Image (cartoon, rainbow, N blue to C red):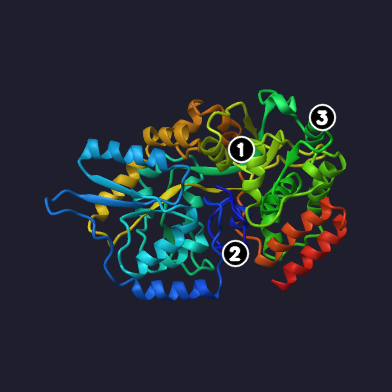
Amino acid sequence: MSTAHESKVIAMRRNPTTQSVSRPMSRRSFVWTAGSLGIAASLLLQGCGSGSDSGSDDGTVELTFMNQSRGQEAALNALAKQYTKETGIVVKVESPGPSDYLAKLQAKAQSRNMPDVYSSFLAVDMAPFYKAGWAMNLEPELKGAWGDQFAPGVVEQSAFIKDNNLDVPPGIYSAHWETQSYGLILDPARTKIDPKAPPKTMDDLITALKASNKDGKGNFSVASSLTPALIQQFASNWLTDQQISDTFAGKSSWKSDGWRKAFQLLLDLKKAGVISNGALPGGQGDNPAVETSFFNKREVGAIFDASAGVSVGKRTAPNYTDYASMPLPAASDATLAPRSPGVPGKGAVVNPRGKHPKEALAFVKWLTMPEQQKVFAEEARIVPTSKELLAGGSLPAQLTGFAAATENQQKVTNSLTPDVNAALTRDTQSLVLGEKTVDQILDDLQSAQERG
């Protein structure tokens, strides 16, 4: 469930996080390039055609679901069979895998053979499909009882506002049974940190990690591609959501004290010797490597990750369950409560041009009900969007810290530009390696902001 976090142009949505630092539902991001623009134009031309050819000669309604996530595949297949038993409607799930998902979805759009339902993805990747008319606007449906069952803010996270920079018509085109947040995944035995009595400050966390650093190689890791999220969360100790958003928009300077202190926190982790091997893994696949070092190799006792990392652990190390999650603690001199970035997670889009759009919508509604969300939460270990489940205290233990983080997520409407995102990822590596100072990094980010 990790990503290389390649630079992207991001929609200005009513989304409480910046998608450029968010954790998409794949290990591979799709770059918004000139080629992608060509695909967008092609999809717009193809959009006037018909959609799914689902159905059978005997009159049985058959729906197709194209699923992107391997982490939810088993749960989704089981739920599809249950839905067939309950309704008589056959649901066929196709799971090409995260690496091939977008390419196959594009091919289906261009051949006018779109599935009835398909997984949502990053806004920049979904925009061509939405603009071509391959997505039902769910906003009218979500204004009623269906929308009321979601936790506050979940529905708004998916909304495209007027004049968004991807030119998607205003509306809501996806429904989600997962919300994602950021924080620590840790092993209590290897860190000596009790998740029921977690460190109150970052100084306390660093002290605990340092004390558990037996071999001197470091007991904490974070991928370079996730450092924009880490720094953004650090900065929220001193900056409001509006101040963070204004920085991303170029209205405020990167040289403010809040950003300086955020990078200083990363430097404090480095100076304490708790960062594994004194470096941040980089390159494509950096976060999968970090997750492997925690879940499979047990080389580190704590990692900074998105909540979807728990799903990765369930899939790649199913017998390892002795770990927990927790939000990042506050900085010792914080003036604000720190807040996690977060995004809509796993969910679905309804094709309005299929043979059975009403049945497809009913199926997606059913998938988002608490009973089905509980299956996803337990089987795929994802944080649900149902306010009933979030308040019920019945989530798997590995998710409770991430669930707590969703209660106080950032609401940032602007996004990092591709230049700044790339610079931030590069510069955090340089900071940890001792190649740049904090002030040099802030200068570099400000220059990248002005170029963008």
Q: Label 1 is placed on what type of residue?
A: Ala
Could you classify mark 3 by the number of other residues whose Cα lies within 10 Å: few (under 14), some (14-19), or many (20 or more)? few
Residue 145 in sight in this render:
no
- Between 151 and 400, the one lying in front of the other is 400
**Residue identifier under label 1:** 405
Residue at the (29%, 48%) spot, across then down:
92
Q: Are marks 3 and 1 in contact (CB under 8 Å)?
A: no
Image position of 60 (left or right of 406): left
Could you classify mark 2 by the number of other residues whose Cα lies within 10 Å: few (under 14), some (14-19), or many (20 or more)? many
Spot occupied by residue 309 in the image (x, y as percentages of width and height): 58, 41
Spot occupied by residue 209 in the image (x, y as percentages of width and height): 79, 32
Q: Which mark is residue 214?
A: 3
Q: Secondary structure at mark 1?
A: helix
Q: Label 2 is placed on what type of residue?
A: Lys
Q: CA distance from mark 2 to mark 3?
A: 40 Å
Q: Which mark is residue 8?
A: 2
